[in-house]
Amino acid sequence: MDFDIIFSHPWWLLLLCLATGFIASAVLYYKNRMNEFSPWKLWLLAFFRFATVSLICFLILAPLIQLRITNQQDPVILLFADNSQSITIIDGESGKTFQEHLFTLSNELSKDYDVVVYQYGNQVSIADTLTFEDKITDISQVFNTIDELYSNRNIGAVVLAGDGIYNRGINPLFISSNQLYPIYTIPLGDTIPKKDILINRLQHNQITYLNNFFPLEITLAAKQSGGSRSRVKIIHEQETIWEQSVFVDTDNYFTTIPVELQALSVGLKRYRIEVEPLANEISTANNISEFFIEVIDSRQKILILAAGPHPDVGALKQALEENENFEIEVSMIENFQGNINNFDVVVWHQLPSTKHNTNELFREAELRNTPQLFILGTLTNLNAFNRLQTGIQVNIRAAGFNDSRAELNNNFTLFQPGNEAVELLPKFPPLQSHFATYDLAPGTQVLVNQKIGNVATDYPLIAFSQSSGRKTGFVAGEGIWRWRLNNFQRNNNHDAFNQMVSSIIQFLTILEDKSFFRVTTDNFLFENQPAIFETELYNKSYELVNTPEINMIITNEDGDEFEYIFGKTNLAYRLTAGIFPVGEYSYKASTTLGTDYYEAEGIFTVSALNIEEINTVANHQLLFQMARNSGGLMAYPDQLNKILEDINSRQDIRPVLYTQYQYEDLINLRWLFFVIMIFLSVEWFIRKYNGSY
C-alpha cells in the first residue's frame, strides 16, 4: 500500500502558505531581543510558529490523500454435481462411487485454490452430500447461479458432473458457450439404451363436465424392446375401466393412444395408468402414471330465442357449441314452452318484435337478473326495446338501414375478444343497422363502433352495459352470419368468430365474487411444488382488512389433519403450506371478523413427477461439446486426475492482482491535530518558562 497527496489548487499556493508562516513567525519574534532568549531558543520558537501557521494554511486548502491498495484474489474452482434421480436409475452404486471421487477431487484442488461444491437438479445449492433425489434437472441454473454469485470473482474453472440429461431450462450448450472460463465435464450414466417401456407423456383436461366424454392421450415409448408385447390399463376406484394390448415392433418404439373416458360423477377424480412390465426391463417406475381431473356439473345454459328463422341464429349456435362449457338451446319465440329461469344467458334475436308479445318473458328475466344479449334487426320493435331500459336507447331518425362495418374501440377493457378477431373485425362484411342515433347510459362500454362507408362514427355496433348487477350485451345489426363465412374464407376456419362469440357469452355469464372471505390456490400441483394460499378478507364496506387471525386445516385422503395459521401481508393474507405427497387434499379456512364467522373450503391435488424416469440414456456428447467449446476437457470418474493436472498446468488459472484507490481529506487525520497542539504547547511553555509574554 502506498499513497499520494492530491492537491486541487495551484501548487504556487504552497509558497503562499510558507510565506504566511514566515511572516507570522518574523512579526512575533523580531521584537524579541537576544537577551530574552538564547539564539537557539529563538530559532526553535520561530520554527514552531512557522511550522504551525504554514501547516494550518495548508490544511485550509483541503488536500486529499490517495491510498493505493493492491490485493490478490486467488482463483475459484466451482464444482457442480448432478443430484437428480436419473443418475442412480441405471446403476445405484455408480452414484455412491462417483460421490467419493468428486470429494477427493475437491480436496486435492483445495490445496491450491478456493473450491466450492454445489449440487444441481431442482435448484442449485451447496452440496454437503448427494442424495440423487431431485425430480427434475435444469443445467442452465448452474450458469445462472455463477452469474449471480461470482460475476466479479476470479473464476478459474467450472467442473460439471452429470449425465447430460436436462428436462427444464435452456439448452446448456447455448448458455455455456458465452462463458469466459474453461468447463471440465465428468460424464455419468450409460449412453447405451436399455430395455424399457414407459409412459412418455399424458395429455388431458383438468376440468370436465358431468356425463361428458373427455379425451386422454397416452404416449408410450419403448427402447430395445422390439418384438415384445404389453398391455395398457386405466384404473379408477380400484376397477379397470379401459385396457388395450400393445405390440412393440421396433427397438425405438413410439406411439400415441387416444382414449375417451366418461365423467359419471361429480368431484375430483383420480385415474391410474399402468403399463405391463417387460421381462428384464431396466425400470418399472416409469410404467405407472396418475392424473386427476375435476368433474363439475355447472355448464352454462344458453337460450337463443329468435323472432323468426335467420342464419344469424345458426351461426351463433355453431360458434357456442365449440365451447364445451356451454349447453345451447335454440327456439323460435312462438314455440318456446320452457322456463326462462333455467338458463344462465338469454340471447334475444330481433326481440322484442312487432309480432310477438314477450313482456312476460322479459319480466321473468329481469326479476332473476338473467344476463342477456340483444341482436337488433328488421323485426325488432325499437319502442318496446327502449322501454326495457337496457342502458342503450335507439332513436330512429328515418326509415331504412345502414351498412355498418366494425371499427374497433381501443379503449374497451371488459374482456379480450381474441387476437384473431381484433385483426379481422374491421375486414368483416357490414351488418344491417337502423338509421338512428344512440344514447348510452353511464358505464356502458363499446367494443366496436359503426363505420358507415368511409366515415367512422361513435354509434355503437357491439356494446355492453351493467345495471343493478345485471349484464346486458347489444349488437346493433343483423347479419353476423356473414362474419362467420368471411372468417372461413380468409383463414379456412371459424376460430376468430367462434372465439369472439364465446368471449361475449363468457363475459355475460361470469358473476362477480361478492363474498367477504376469499381463498385462492392452484388446485393442481406436482409433488415438487409447494401449496400456496392467498386470502382476502373484507368488511361490510368491502374494504380489505387483515386484523383477525385466519386458521386453516388441510386434510389428506386418510383423514389426517394439518393445522396452519396464515401470515399477514400488506392488506391480505398468505400461507405457504409446503410440499405435500402425491394425493388428494381438502382444505377449510376460517376466521371471525367482529360477530361474523366466515369459512372457505376447497380441494387440491398433488400429482407425481416422473420426468427423470422418462429418459435414462446419458447424453455424453452434450458434455463433451460443452468442455471442448470452452477450452476444457471431459474426463470419466476414474480419470479425475486428468482434470487436476490440466488445471494445475494452465497459465490462465492464476491469482489476480487488483488495485483499489481510497480517498480521504488530509484534515481528517487526527495525528496532525496532535502535532499542531504539541508545537503550540512547546512554544507556549518555553516562552512562559523564560518569562516572555
Image (cartoon, helix red, strand yellow):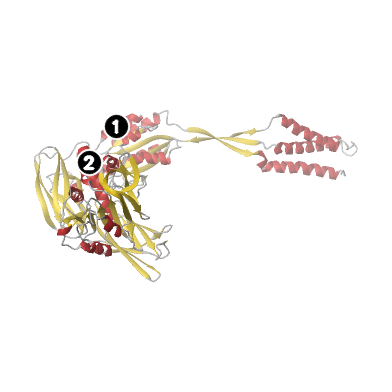
Judged left or right of residue 98, residue 217 is left
Q: Is residue 668 above or below residue 292?
A: above
From the viewer's side, name the closer residue of 108 and 210: 210
User: Where is residue 204 shown, x and y percent of the image?
Assistant: 20, 49
At horizontal 72% and vertical 32% (from top left) the residue drawn is: 14
Can residue 51 be seen in this snapshot? yes
Q: Left of 124 or right of it: where is 586?
A: left
**What amino acid does circle 2 point to?**
Asn
The Cα atoms of the two marked residues, 2 and 1, are separated by 52 Å
Nearer the viewer's eye, disc 2 or disc 1? 2
Residue drawn at (33%, 39%) of the image: 140
The image quadrant that residue 161 belongs to is: top left
Question: Where's the C terminus, which quadrant?
Answer: top right
Q: Residues within 10 Å of mark 1 (few under 14, many from 20)?
A: many
Whichever of labels 2 and 1 marks the residue nearer the N terminus, that label is 2
Q: Secondary structure at mark 1?
A: helix
Instruction: Return the residue at label 2.
Output: 487
Can see residue 640?
A: no
Given residues 71 and 529, the one toward you in this image is: 529
Question: Which residue has dot 1 on it?
Answer: 624
Q: Amino acid at mark 1?
A: Phe
Residue 197, horizontal then vertical, whole percent = 15, 43
